[in-house]
Amino acid sequence: MTVRAFVPFLACAVLALAACGDKETSEPVAEPEEMSVLAETASTAETQAEPNNTSGDAHGAELTKVSSQAAAAEQAKGVFKRAAQGDAEAVYLANCQYCHIQLGPGTITLSRRLGPEEALLANRTDLTEGYVKTVVRNGLNTMPALTRVEVSDEELELIAAYLTRNNNSGEE
Amino acid sequence: MAERTLPPGLDEAGFDRAINALRQTLGEGKVFATELDRNTYIDPYALGDGLDHAASAAVAPESVEEVQAIVRVANEHRLPLWPVARGKNLGYGAAAPVLAGSAVLDMTRMNKILDVDERFAYATLEPGVGFYQFHEHLTNNDIPLWMSVPANGWGSVIGNALERGIGYTPYGDHTSKLCGLEVVTPTGELVRTGMGAMEGNKSWAHYPYSFGPSWDQMFAQSNLGVVTKANMWMMPEPEMTAHTQVNLPEMEDIEWAMDILADLRLRGVIEHNVVFGNYLHDASAFTTRADWYDGEGPIPDEVAEKIQETYNVGWWTFHLSLFGDGSIVEAKQKIVSDAFEPRLGKKLEWRHWRKGQPREPFSIAVGVPMVLPLNVVNWMGGRGGHIGFSPVLPPSGELAYDAFLRRKRRFEEAGLDYYSSFTVGHRHIANVNMILYNRDDADMVRRTKELFTQMIADAREEGYGEYRTHIEYMDPVAETYDFNNHALMRLNETVKDALDPNGIIAPGRGGVWPARLRDGRKG
């Protein structure tokens, strides 16, 4: 039986993501150097974390608070109102912010699978439109599929375009 | 992936006629009947592949008149409809129907916030309005009313209330905060309950009962109509809140602590539903089981202790909040502290928020929606799911401790991790026994099913029944309500047959089947 050092690392890493999210609320596209800072912060957290860390940094209630704040910060910008007007970023947020926000379930899961630097979906540069559409309609692991009633085909086009906006080549 | 499953009594041609009739009535963009559409309505947390509850199609109205038209077409063609608000009833089947082959009546697009009355503290909403959408509306318009939100904020405000879902502010008994419904009946008629039954009545959202019989609860967890709008009472923003966390180190502590808590709830000192949960809550939200333990069987005690240390929780932990005017909150804080501190042997640490400050602790405790708790489905690895067995208990420490020991033993026999909440209401406990499983592990799914079935039987034997259940278990749970040889079921069936003679609306919901499908329900 082994309690792995990963546990305090994850807690600190997701806190680091939360800090990154604060930047994102005012500046949706994370710059490369921000991502480096994030990775470094997470890495530092890993090496400095005490195995029995009960200082509060890893406290579930604190993490929960961050999760709520992240989504609410987006709502403050009128996500649903802008989505109704066809704003691509808002369409993405209105449908995906539940999980793909700082410390949302999707972000935590992606952090585990791909590392914290790849965890925030809106900052990715390696997604293709085809991949986004496939995942949305079929689900992935514990992510539920989204129906065409919830996300219309037209809205999915906007979401896919938004999530691939930072790609170098843009092609699938 | 999924072959088309047709509803009983309809062949391919008959089903296609029904779908075509819906298309002609509504237009192409509101009927969804491709293989991909059907797949998106499969329960994402299904125990297995979920095809035993596969929908045949979906239809998405945008107005009350369209709901009525759909119901009339469904009657004409004997097409069973499964109404959902936003289809996010995760852990209970999500948007999937009890009866395979039903068409989902998806109300997601009816998402208008029709009215928010600041002075009288209520809102009139369509069922597609989600918690996040509503929260955005309230905060962006500086409306000083607080929502009450459940642990999963992805869903519908009205849908959750109709499921008897709960939140964690003093307005957390959501179904009791409904005040007047507008409903399309199974034959397509439009009715309003409560004072709304009078045309132009000014008190629809103020008084819930009306004159004569009152029917609102008839449409909660039911298959007797399609709710198209509802009034929801809301909590005026309090002047102040106070919050504290109570950790209990030993599993036996539930007995004395529950008695104190129940007394504080009964006397109105604590006014919100309290989640009295075991140590697994935070760990399963932020990590997976494999991060802690890679052996077979339930988590050993040493690992449980490690989890408690890491997250600063006890074997049991609960959070308490106080709401109201400053003097009231301060007085209540003293009462709560005096009640718990002698047994805890230490002071409670309180955090405070006052009107005008950023909302704190900014979570579901103060009506801010999130979906973070959904992360528990990753606990076992693979494609995860959760299902809760939730019998209702009297608010007694002795009975809670007894139920805890019995349920925990069953989890251990099944080789599954015990995850539990004793959610303390005003005069009851909803004991949510959450089974976390990996859908891709056939043996684990089998053990989950056996555990759930066993707990239904155990609880019935002890004199307890569930308040809400997954679509897979609606029949056996309904079966446990057996007073006078299932007199309640006979009443439900009598009402069902009277209001829904063609058996169109949600056959099997709540274990209630229409006459034409009743004989085969056990199969």
Image (cartoon, coloured by chain):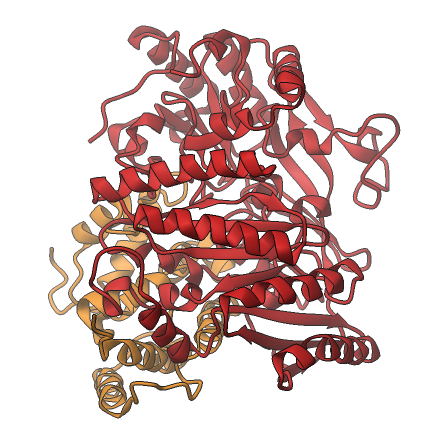
> Which residue does the image show at 83% across and 36% down from the upper left?
B209
The residue lying toward the viewer, choosing from A79 and A71, is: A71
Q: How many badges with numbers are in the image?
A: 0
Quadrant for the N terminus of chain B in the image:
top left
Residue B2 horizontal side relative to residue B339, left or right: left
Q: Quadrant of residue A14?
A: bottom left
| Picture layout, residue B477 above or below residue B347 | above
| Picture layout, residue B178 above or below residue A33 | above
**Among the chains, which one is red?**
B
Residue A42: x, y in percent? 26, 84
Residue B342: x, y in percent? 69, 81
Chain A: its colour in the image is: orange
Query: Can the viewer see residue B330?
Result: yes
Residue B47 horizontal side relative to residue B176, left or right: left
Residue B429 horizontal side relative to residue A70, left or right: right
Residue B338: x, y in percent? 74, 79
> Which residue does the image show at 26% across and 69% down from the upper left?
B292
Query: Can the viewer see residue B43?
Result: no
